[in-house]
Amino acid sequence: MLQAMKKMFVPETRVDEKMREWHRQAAHTPDIALLEQFNRQLIFVTDNTHDDLLSKASWSGKATNPTCYTLDEYTLWKKDLGKASYSIVLPSNYVPTGFVKWPVEPARIRGALWSIRPNAFISLDKTRGNGVRFIRRRVNIAYNYRTLAYDPKKPLPHLSDHNYFTMLQAWMYVGVPEYWDAMIGGIFASSQLDTHEHYPPRTWMQKFYQFD
C-alpha cells in the first residue's frame, strides 16, 4: 500500500533521474549541501583563470578585494601552457624531487578575494579536479585596507599607509604534491616562480609570491 502511494505521488524513475544528475554534477563537491546553507562563500584565487565564472557568480561582477594575501606561507608554481598558464599553490614544506633553479622559499601569496554563490563551486571543483589535482581548503586571508581621515584645517584628506589589515577565512585550492611533483622542477624548471618584495617595504609584509 505504501509503495503504491509513493508511486502515485512521486514517480520512482523521475526521482532517480534527478538524484543521479545531482550526484553526477556534484561528484567533486561532496560538501555542496553545507556550502549552500549560506548565501555567499569567499574564495581566494591566485590567477585570473576563472574570472568569467567568478564574475557571473558574484554580486557586482568584480572581486571583493583584488589585492589580498594569505596569512600563512605556501609555495607557488606555474603550469606553463603559454597564454593558458595557471598557478599551482603547494604546501610550504613541499620540495620537488627534480632540480630547481634556486632554493625553494615558502612565502605568503598575493591574490584576489571573491564573494560568490555557493553553487559555483560545482563548476570550480570540477575544473580544478577537487580531490585529485587540488584540495579545496579553508585558509586565513589578510584583508588589507587603508584609512581615510579628514582635518578641517587641511584642504585634502589624509590617506594612511598600507599597514592595516583584518583576517578573514576563505576557500583556496591547494595542490596535491603527489600529483604535481612529476610536472615541477627538472625539465619543467620554468615552473618555479620567484618571490617579490614591496617597494617601499611594508612592515607587515616581507616577501610574497604573485602569479604574473
Image (cartoon, helix red, strand yellow):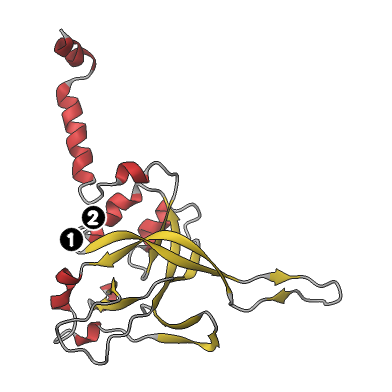
Q: Is residue 199 above or below residue 79?
A: below
Secondary element type, mark 1: loop
Q: Position of residue 109 (x, y in %)?
A: 39, 75
In which image quadrant can residue 190 be found? Answer: bottom left
Q: Quadrant of residue 140?
A: bottom left
Please tell me which residue is depicted at 14% across the width and 25% down the height of the picture. 13
Residue found at the far bottom of this picture: 102
Between disc 1 and disc 2, the foreground one is 1
> What's the mark number on residue 161?
none
Location of the C terminus by quadrant is bottom left
Image marks 1 and 2: residues in contact by CB distance under 8 Å: no
Farthest residue to the top: give it: 1
Q: Position of residue 100 (x, y in %)?
A: 21, 89
The amino acid sitting under disc 1 is Val
Taking 193 as reference, is 141 left or right? right
Report how far apart the C-alphas of labels 1 and 2 lie in the structure. Answer: 10 Å
Q: Residues within 10 Å of mark 2 (few under 14, many from 20)?
A: some
Q: Residue at x 77, y 76 (%)?
A: 156
* Residue 89 at least partly seen: no
Identify the residue shown where x is 45% and y is 87%.
Answer: 197
Find residue 132 and name its label: 1
**Callout 1: few (<14), some (14-19), or many (20+) C-alpha neighbours within 10 Å?**
few
Q: Is residue 125 positioned above or below 97 on the image?
A: above
135 or 190: nearer the eye? 135
**Element under label 2?**
helix
Which quarter of the figure has residue 93? bottom left
The amino acid type, in three-letter code, at marker 2 is Lys
Pick the quarter of the image with the N terminus: top left
Which of the numbered marks, if any, corresponds to residue 126? 2
Percent from the top left, x then y, of residue 188? 17, 84
44 left or right of 92? right
